[in-house]
Amino acid sequence: YCAPAKLNEYIAAGIPVCASSLPSIQAIVERYDIGWVFPSNTAEGVSATLHRLSALDIARKRANCVKAYENELNYDHQFAPVASQLGL
């Protein structure tokens, strides 16, 4: 399992993510449509992904980051089940 804090910080800041295809990160990026996953970790794979980006794509992913953070990927939402179990 790998979900670095940096990923959450980017999402919270509304910054779309360009990520390698690590399964846990890829799942988040694709579920919330908040960025792009490189099909391979080669220079060619990264370059191909970056060359496909448009201003419209970036704006849409940015909006998706904000929406994902406001609705789910924030401390209050993540902690709610734990707080409930603890009776808080």
Image (tube, rainbow, N blue to C red):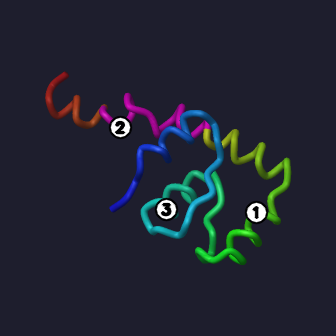
Image depth: mark 3 or mark 1 in front? 1
Above-or-below relation of 73 to 51: above
Q: Residue at x 81, y 65 (%)?
A: 52
- Classify mark 2: residues with Cα within 10 Å, few (<14), some (14-19) or many (20+): few
Considering every residue shown, the one lying at the far left of the view is 86
The label number, if any, that marks residue 50 in the structure image: 1
Give the quarter of the image for residue 47: bottom right
State the image coordinates of residue 72 (x, y, percent, origin top left): 47, 39
In the rendered image, which quarter contains the N terminus? bottom left
Label 3 vs label 1: CA separation? 19 Å
Considering every residue shown, the one lying at the far front of the view is 43
Left or right side of 9 for 40: right
Image depth: mark 1 or mark 2 in front? 1
Label 2 vs label 3: CA separation? 17 Å
Q: Are the residues flagged by discs 1 and 2 in contact, CB closer than 8 Å? A: no
The label number, if any, that marks residue 27 in the structure image: 3
| Kind of residue at disc 3 | Ala
Label 1 vs label 2: CA separation? 31 Å
Q: Residue at x 56, y 41 (%)?
A: 10
Q: Which residues are magenta?
A: 66-79
Among numbered discs 3 and 1, the one appearing first in the sequence:
3
Considering every residue shown, the one lying at the far top of the view is 88
- Classify mark 3: residues with Cα within 10 Å, few (<14), some (14-19) or many (20+): few
The residue at which mark 2 appears reads as 78
